[in-house]
Amino acid sequence: NGLGIGQALLKKYVVYAKQNVRPRLANIDTDKLTKVYAELRRESEAGGGMPLAVRHIESMIRMSEACARIHLRQTVRDEDVNFAIRVMLESFIGSQKFGVQRALTKQFSKYLAYQKDNDELLLYLLQGLFRDEAQFARSKSFLRLTQEDEPVRVHVRDLQQRAKELDVHDLSTFMDSSLFAAHFTHDAQAKTIERVAAP
């Protein structure tokens, strides 16, 4: 599909990331993880759930750094921290009794919905870019500067720029998602996006 890479290249990528990238958390990120840990510990104890251990906050720190490392970033971003929090919460909440699960899921919904919210936001941004491009294409067609049946395309860099304005830096999860595939196709070589043709 043009998005995959071979195992040999993937191995080199992982080795390079391990050897050359050493991301570290800023104090503000550590404070955020500590706050989530304290809240989760309090809520789980109040509900009679399984106890939370110090190793859980250590795991969130390592996952935050690992997420940054796999993207070859020397600095841990907020999105890396949010990803680590979501993964840890899903794992921990899944190990609780049903009643405790429901309470914790409600309490920490803003963290659990992290990537889902990003995907919906990126879909909205992309649809807006297509509306703009379609309007521009109609104008060019009216002036006979292009063919009427020329497909509308959006450059990936335009979506990246719009996303960065909202502090979203990673498009890969969205572009690999079923939400994206249901509406669009990605030409990796041309670095453009087209709408999926209606059946």
Image (cartoon, helix red, strand yellow):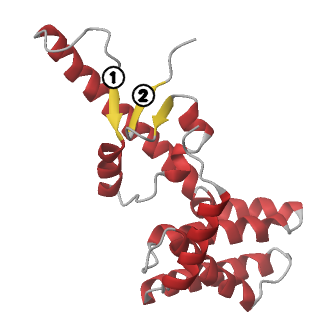
Q: Which kind of residue does numbered mark 2 sit on?
A: Glu
Quarter of the C terminus within the rendering: top right
Quarter of the N terminus within the rendering: top right
Determine whether label 2 and label 1 are within 8 Å by CB. Answer: yes
| Nearest to the observer: residue 4 or residue 89 | 4
Q: Secondary structure at mark 2?
A: strand
| Nearest to the observer: residue 27 or residue 181 | 181
Q: Is residue 14 left or right of residue 71?
A: right
Neighbor class of circle 2 (other Cα within 10 Å; few <14, some 14-19, many 20+) is some
Q: CA distance from mark 2 to mark 1?
A: 7 Å
| Nearest to the observer: residue 137 or residue 121 | 137
The residue labelled by disc 2 is 194
Give the residue furthest to the left: 143
Is residue 189 in view from this perspective? Answer: yes
The residue labelled by disc 1 is 152
Q: Check the image and report above or below for 180 versus 194.
A: below
**In the image, what residue occupies the spot 87% across and 60% down?**
98
Residue 189, given in percent of the width and then of the height, sits at 42, 40
**In the image, what residue occupies the spot 40% across and 59% down?**
169
Q: Secondary structure at mark 1?
A: loop
Q: Is residue 62 left or right of residue 141?
A: right
Q: How many marks?
A: 2
Q: Quadrant of residue 2?
A: top right
Q: Check the image and report above or below for 186 versus 45.
A: above
Q: Quadrant of residue 121?
A: top left
Residue 63, given in percent of the width and then of the height, sits at 62, 76
Q: Is residue 167 left or right of residue 72?
A: left
Is residue 81 in view from this perspective? Answer: no
Q: Which kind of residue does numbered mark 1 sit on?
A: Val
| Nearest to the observer: residue 59 or residue 171 | 171
First reached walking from the N terminus: tag 2 or tag 1: 1
Q: Check the image and report above or below for 7 versus 175.
A: below
